[in-house]
Amino acid sequence: MKQAQWIIEENRRLDQQILDQQNENEVRRQVLHQSLLISNKNAKAYRG
Protein backbone atom coordinates (compact mmCIF):
# COMPACT_ATOMS: atom_id res chain seq x y z
CA MET A 1 0.00 0.00 0.00
CA LYS A 2 2.84 2.32 0.87
CA GLN A 3 4.39 1.52 -2.54
CA ALA A 4 1.17 2.47 -4.34
CA GLN A 5 0.97 5.78 -2.48
CA TRP A 6 4.59 6.55 -3.39
CA ILE A 7 3.87 5.82 -7.06
CA ILE A 8 0.82 8.10 -7.04
CA GLU A 9 2.80 10.92 -5.45
CA GLU A 10 5.71 10.43 -7.83
CA ASN A 11 3.34 10.54 -10.83
CA ARG A 12 1.82 13.77 -9.54
CA ARG A 13 5.25 15.26 -9.07
CA LEU A 14 6.30 14.29 -12.60
CA ASP A 15 3.04 15.60 -14.08
CA GLN A 16 3.65 18.91 -12.34
CA GLN A 17 7.21 18.97 -13.64
CA ILE A 18 5.92 18.47 -17.20
CA LEU A 19 3.37 21.28 -16.78
CA ASP A 20 6.04 23.60 -15.41
CA GLN A 21 8.31 22.76 -18.34
CA GLN A 22 5.53 23.41 -20.86
CA ASN A 23 4.77 26.78 -19.24
CA GLU A 24 8.44 27.69 -19.30
CA ASN A 25 8.69 26.71 -22.98
CA GLU A 26 5.65 28.83 -23.81
CA VAL A 27 7.15 31.85 -22.03
CA ARG A 28 10.45 31.36 -23.88
CA ARG A 29 8.60 31.07 -27.19
CA GLN A 30 6.77 34.34 -26.54
CA VAL A 31 9.95 36.15 -25.52
CA LEU A 32 11.75 34.87 -28.60
CA HIS A 33 8.86 35.91 -30.80
CA GLN A 34 8.88 39.42 -29.30
CA SER A 35 12.62 39.80 -29.78
CA LEU A 36 12.30 38.67 -33.41
CA LEU A 37 9.59 41.26 -34.01
CA ILE A 38 11.77 43.96 -32.45
CA SER A 39 14.78 42.85 -34.52
CA ASN A 40 12.73 43.02 -37.71
CA LYS A 41 11.43 46.45 -36.79
CA ASN A 42 14.95 47.69 -36.05
CA ALA A 43 16.28 46.23 -39.30
CA LYS A 44 13.55 47.98 -41.29
CA ALA A 45 14.20 51.27 -39.50
CA TYR A 46 17.92 50.92 -40.12
CA ARG A 47 17.42 50.20 -43.84
CA GLY A 48 15.04 53.12 -44.05
Image (spheres, helix red, strand yellow):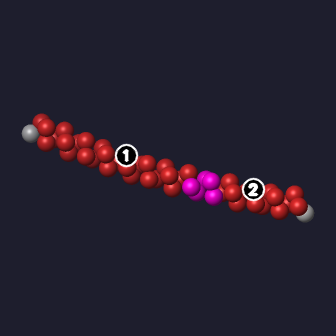
Q: Residues within 10 Å of mark 1 (few under 14, many from 20)?
A: few
Q: Main secondary structure of the magenta part?
A: helix
Q: Quadrant of residue 16?
A: bottom right
Q: Quadrant of residue 13?
A: bottom right
Please state the horizontal and vertical placement of residue 8, each as a whole percent of the image.
78, 61
Q: Which residue is mark 2?
A: 10
Residue found 68% across the figure and 54% down from its top: 14
Relative height, residue 5 to residue 41 (above, below): below
Q: Is residue 39 left or right of residue 23?
A: left
Please state the horizontal and vertical placement of residue 34, each as a whole percent of the image.
32, 49
Farthest top residue in view: 47
Location of the C terminus by quadrant is top left
**Span highlighted in magenta in the image:** 16-20
Amino acid type for the residue under numbered disc 1: Leu
Instruction: Tell me, for residue 32, which label it has, or none.
Output: 1
| Residue 39 on the magenta segment | no
Q: Is residue 9 left or right of residue 27?
A: right
